[in-house]
Image (tube, helix red, strand yellow):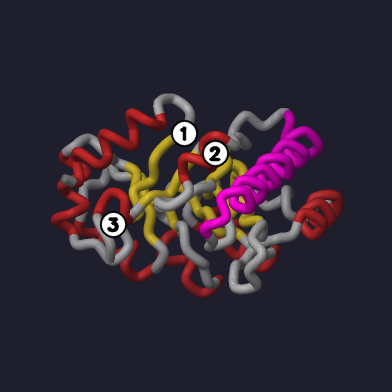
């Protein structure tokens, strides 16, 4: 079932966006089923679980940290994480850069933007991010490569609202790309869309979609 679900989603995505299979809380056996079907990009939202799975599973897997990341946990994933989606503060960015330098690498990261109507979601507002970029501090961190943005839509059945939030994120991405990263080819990712709303996200310009329950079943 897992292999079939992945194939169906990838067929629908085509060349438009890449699939991150969200494997949080899922056993090694389920991840291996996806891996053996040829899928190698997985997302986790807890550092301890991410590290345990990294140790246990094939080393050609591309691991993405998609959850809220605490500064004191960065050091554990810094040696191997392929993309950190949730950079939501200058403090966190500075720690990631520091750990990147310690590991002789530039860690690929996304700015997490607050696009939802819910206060519980993390992220920069457009104003906050533009201000930091204009000051120059955030794009002068030697241990980070900025690769784009991530956002989560409001948890609602109102597809019009979801679409507008995704549209807003893509507009912010376009503005920031043009003003601050126009010469940086790596700055190209828009991570938005999950199991319930990814088709809308892709229509609005997502390049990465984070899908868990539609692949592995409900937790």
Circle on res. 54 = 3
Compute the Cα span from label 3 to label 1. 24 Å
Q: Nearer the viewer, residue 80 or 181?
A: 181
Q: Position of residue 189 (x, y in %)?
A: 57, 39
Structural crowding at the residue carrying mark 3, measured as other residues with C-alpha within 10 Å and reported as few (<14), some (14–19) or many (≥20): some
User: What residue is rendered at 72% in x and 36% in y?
Assistant: 174
Residue numbers of the magenta segment: 157-182
Residue 56 falls left or right of residue 156: left
In the picture provided, is 174 more to the left or to the right than 6? right
Q: Secondary structure at mark 1?
A: loop
Looking at the picture, how far across and down is residue 128, in whole percent?
79, 60
The image shows residue 138, relative to residue 5, as above or below, that is below
Would residue 177 be visible to someone looking at this image?
Answer: yes
Q: Give the quarter of the figure containing the C terminus.
A: bottom left
Q: Is residue 86 left or right of residue 22?
A: right
The residue tagged 2 is 206
Disc on the earlier residue, 3 or 1: 1
């Amino acid at each position: 079932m897992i292999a079939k679900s992945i194939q169906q989603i990838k067929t629908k995505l085509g060349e438009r966006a890449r699939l991150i299979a969200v494997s949080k809380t899922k056993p090694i056996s389920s991840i291996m089923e996806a891996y053996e079907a040829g899928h190698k990009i997985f997302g986790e939202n807890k550092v301890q679980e991410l590290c345990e799975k990294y140790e246990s599973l094939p080393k050609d897997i591309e691991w993405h940290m998609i959850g809220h990341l605490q500064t004191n946990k960065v050091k554990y994933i810094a040696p191997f994480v392929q993309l950190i989606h949730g950079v939501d503060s200058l403090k966190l960015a500075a720690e990631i850069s520091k750990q990147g330098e310690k590991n002789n690498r530039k860690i690929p990261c996304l700015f997490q933007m607050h696009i939802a109507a819910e206060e519980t979601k993390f992220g920069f507002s457009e104003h906050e991010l533009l201000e930091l970029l204009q000051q120059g501090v955030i794009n002068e961190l030697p241990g980070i490569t900025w690769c784009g943005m991530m956002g989560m839509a409001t948890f609602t059945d109102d597809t019009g609202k979801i679409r507008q939030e995704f549209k807003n994120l893509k507009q912010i991405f376009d503005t920031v790309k043009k003003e601050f990263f126009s010469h940086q080819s790596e700055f190209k990712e828009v991570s938005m869309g999950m199991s319930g709303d990814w088709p809308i996200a892709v229509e609005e310009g997502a390049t990465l979609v984070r899908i868990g329950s539609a692949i592995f079943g409900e937790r």
